[in-house]
Amino acid sequence: MIIVVLAVILSVLIGFFFGIVYRKKIGEAAIGSAEEKAKNIINEAIKTAETKQKEALLEAKEDIHRNRTEAEREIRDRRTELQRLEKRVIQKEEILDKREESYETKEAALAKQMKKIEALESEKQAVISEQKRLLEQISGMSTEQARAYLLDVLQNDLKHESAAMIKDMELRTREEAEIQARELISRAIQKCASDHVSEVTVSVVSLPNDEMKGRIIGREGRNIRALENLTGVDLIIDDTPETITLSSFDPVRREIARVALERLIQDGRIHPTRVNDMVEKARKEVDQVIKKEGERALFETNIHGLHPELVKLLGRLHYRTSFGQNVLNHSIEVSHLSGILAGELHIDVASAKRAGLLHDIGKAVDQQLEGSHVSIGVEIVRKYKEHENIIHAIEAHHGDVEAKTVLAAIVQAADAISAARPGARREDIENYIKRLEKLEALANDFKGVERSFAIQAGREIRVMVRPEDISDDDMIILAREIAKRIESELEYPGQIKVHVIRENRAIEYAR
């Protein structure tokens, strides 16, 4: 058994040995073949590298040759350009040298001419001095006197030219403006056909007989005292037969007193209690009339959205007169005229009619408040939130402030048309005479005026001037100055024509 085992082990060892030997031979053969292949590959790689190296060297030589050729060509081009520029610079230098020589020649010539001019200037000054001396000797005037004389002549010439220019421009402007204004105003007046009859405030109550005076006075004057206390109106009972005069600055109070007194006379029962009842009834009746008149004004002018208090104030104008003209009717007329003029000028007609209707609203309460009716009216319409354009038109309708909008100018024109046309207003003889005297006195204040005459109810003034003091050119300037002073110092309706008259007379006697 042991022998078998040993034999097996031995056989295994022998087999392992022979395997090792066989593998070694096979490995050596493979290694030899691989080394040979590697040598061949290396040799081929060396040959390829040498070939590529030669090709790269050839390409590099070609690039170098090409770059050198391009650089040489660029250098040649630049050298050629530099030579060309050098030639141009040399040519310019030559031209500048020639110009310099020419300028020097001209400068020398100019210097000679300047010397000649200076010599001539000296000669001229000497001649002028000699001429001045001769002129002073011939004329008998010094230089200052001659200068003053020439300035005076020049001033007169300029004055004449300016007067002629002013006259020409004024005539041309006035003609154009008057043509357009006449067309607008005539169209407006033709379209507005309102009444223009002057009204007189009722202040006299007729009595059926003189016995009624005693009944109105009452025992110890209690009836008349009650009536005066309740209405705020003074009752004047004098020797005038069958009449009683009512006196009050407030037209509404005067109307209430008139209505109450007429009702008492008709009723016949006159005592303090009855007076109180009649006054209350008259007040309510007058309030109703005021409301209706305000609504009538809105209806006739087609104005909407007016505050109720403004409507009442408009109604109060029914009892207010100005120079005999009913203020409410005047306001309605101004509203119509303003609307027509606004339509002609393509302005908002509704705003123009509204401003025209409200322009005299301050006259409704001007007896109760301090200030002009313009300022009072402005406060009233501002209180009731009217538009600023309406407020400005009311403020400017008498020229208290400058009219800054077309609407304000329209209201001014409409107010002047309504107030100035014949029959619209009247004034008492005393104020009329004072206005004419003031107009004449204003014209007589100017230097050179001999006499002046106000004619055409104060709508024209003729000014006679002394011909030795006022020239024909001065007449134009004088007329303008008088007109400006009238505009600034006087209040008047419409316009006043200033007519300056200068008369020359030559008188001689044959002996």
Image (cartoon, grey):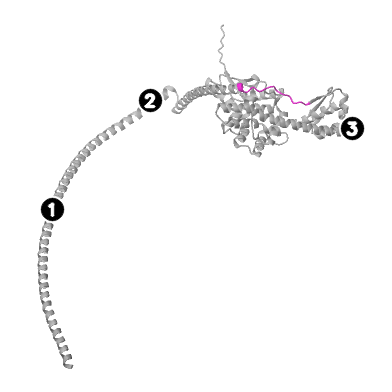
Residue that mark 1 sits on: 66
Side of 47 where 382 appears, left or right: right
Q: Position of residue 442 (x, y in %)?
A: 63, 25
Disc 3 is placed on an element classified as helix
**Residue at image mark 3:** 220
Q: Secondary structure at mark 2?
A: helix
Image disc number at residue 131: 2
The x and y percentages for residue 69 are 12, 51
Quadrant for the N terminus, please.
bottom left
Is residue 403 located in the magenta-colored stretch of the structure?
no
**Identity of the amino acid at label 3?**
Glu
Q: Mark 3 or mark 2, which has the lower sequence index?
A: 2
Q: Residue at x 87, y 23 (%)?
A: 210
Give how far apart the Cα atoms at labels 2 and 1 are.
94 Å
Q: Residue at x 10, y 74 (%)?
A: 32
Against 10, residue 182 (above or below) is above
Quarter of the rendering containing residue 458 = top right
In this view, the residue in front, 52 or 243, is: 52
Q: Position of residue 92 (x, y in %)?
A: 20, 41
Please, what is the dominant secondary structure of the magenta stretch?
A: loop
* Residue at the farthest front position: 1
Place of residue 155 in the rendered image (x, y in percent of width and height, measured from the top left) = 48, 26
Secondary element under disc 1, as helix, strand or loop, is helix
Q: Residue at x 88, y 27 (%)?
A: 214
Q: Which range is magenta? A: 189-203
Is residue 336 visible to the viewer in this orientation of the structure?
A: yes
Viewer-closest of 146 and 326: 326
Disc 3 to disc 2, C-alpha distance: 107 Å
The mark nearer the N terminus, 2 or 1, is: 1
Residue 249 in sight: no
Q: Tag 1: residue type?
A: Arg
